[in-house]
Image (cartoon, rainbow, N blue to C red):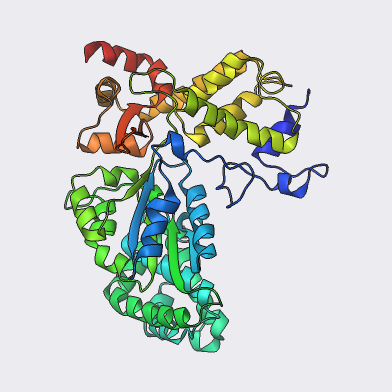
Amino acid sequence: MNSPNFLAKAIYGGRFPDLPKDLQLHRPFQPLPAGDPTYVNCNEVRGDSDILVELGNELIMSDRNTCQLYAGHRGGGKSTELLRLKADLEQKGFFVVYFAADSEDIEPEDTEYTDILLACTRQILEALKDNADPAPLLNWLKSRWQELKDLALTEVSLESLGIEGQIAQYGKITANLRAEPGQRQKIRERVNPYTVPLIDALNQFIREAKRNLPQGREQLAVIADNLDRIVPVPQEDKHTNHEHIFIDRSEQLKKLDCHIIYTVPISLIYSGRVTDLRDIYGSEAQVLPMVMVHLPDNRPYTAGIEKMKEVLALRVRRIDPNLSLVGDVFAEAESLEMLCAMSGGHVRNLLLIAKQAMGYGTGFPIPKKHLLRSISEARNTYRNAVYANEWELLAKVYASKAIENEEQYRSLLFNRCILEYSETNEEGERHCWYDVHPLIRGIKEFQDACTRV
């Protein structure tokens, strides 16, 4: 096998006339759809974490609307798990509105509660416009139209548009919130005083839609994904926008007349207000940990490493079931083991490192030196993400496998320099522990800090 482009581009995306359509469109850096043959169930090496049980059962067994939070490291597989949950709920009689908020509706670098409410409104309206009269929402929009129109959202008169055209204006509002930094705060200022009547109008729409759901659908659930990507921004009161959105505006987040799941930044789960979150939402936020590729005593964890190999193997076998990871793709078993260990149990890291190593050569199998070079490049990225005063914090985490309730630790969780793992003992008790990303262990500044701790 001497064509790296065939394998690499088939795995990582690309259009080739000689590839089946499903391979051409298969992009593993995107969430896997439910039932995808390359999905690997990693529950047993994630502390028996199972979204169908931990989130799904809460919806299925509850006699009232629920509002739940779901967290985890970015790129760790949350969206794939949420899509599995969506499919499972649909099989059990739910109508599910799933959307990735950062794709069209919010700007993660600058997000406030109003942006999320408008995003939910647009997505629910689009998904259920054939099941209910949109008049309550359109009437709210008409009452605010002159102010919003004055901000150059559009030049058209709302009355001149048909129902579809009026509905489309919600999309223009969220598009401008995302794409126009200069207008973003002005739009919020015009909408913020009227969020309560907007929620009332949305709930009128939702209640009618629930009465007219398709046959076999008895309940409505909304999944707002990728809100965990919202970057923390300190506010004047010394809190962050994360706290303002998910705690200070929690009553509005919970007020939608349906089941709803919001993804939240993992750093918020370990903030000083975590007890507030539990009290407000009525349960612990569920966290998707990393695949455990090593034990707390730093020994390799074979079961976890085998799972990471399986992630790669299924993608390779989808192209050619006769290809083997060792020999055809990687030159030696040691290289494959090293790749899985250096990923930290983070699937996106695993694929990124492998992809970059492919790009250094002209054929397969990938030699160890190319993989080492890719690991080195990834390590430099993590080095650049750490401030000088954070090396000793990382050394403490490596030694103790624990984190402290301090903002610096939360920041390191958010940028994935610290990873969360989970394991379950024979009695069923779950234990969470923390460690630095394995790539960081090879950085000189970290090694020096370890000698001082």
Task: Identify whether 107 is placed above or below 321.
Answer: below
Q: State which quarter of the image contains the N terminus.
A: top right
Q: Residue furthest bottom?
A: 159
Residue at the (42%, 67%) spot, across then down = 120
Residue 72 is left or right of residue 433, and the answer is right
- Frontmost residue, 14 versus 87: 87
Task: Identify whether 283 is placed above or below 412.
Answer: below
Residue 301 is left or right of residue 393, and the answer is right
Give residue 183's quadrant in the image.
bottom left
Q: Residue furthest left?
A: 237
* Residue 226 visible to an observer of this rendering: no
- Frontmost residue, 56 versus 418: 56
Q: Residue 358: where, in percent of width, then height?
A: 65, 25
Q: State which quarter of the image contains the C terminus.
A: top left
- Frontmost residue, 140 versus 301: 301
Q: Residue furthest right?
A: 18
Task: Identify whether 214 is placed above or below 371.
Answer: below
Residue at the (45%, 78%) spot, across then down = 210
* Residue 446 visible to an observer of this rendering: yes
Residue at the (47%, 34%) spot, across then down = 346
Q: Residue 9: where, in percent of width, then height?
A: 70, 36
Task: Identify whether 77 is placed above or below 6.
Answer: below
Residue 81 is left or right of residue 5, and the answer is left
Q: Residue furthest front?
A: 427
Give residue 162's quadrant in the image.
bottom right
Q: Residue 170: where, in percent of width, then height?
A: 47, 73
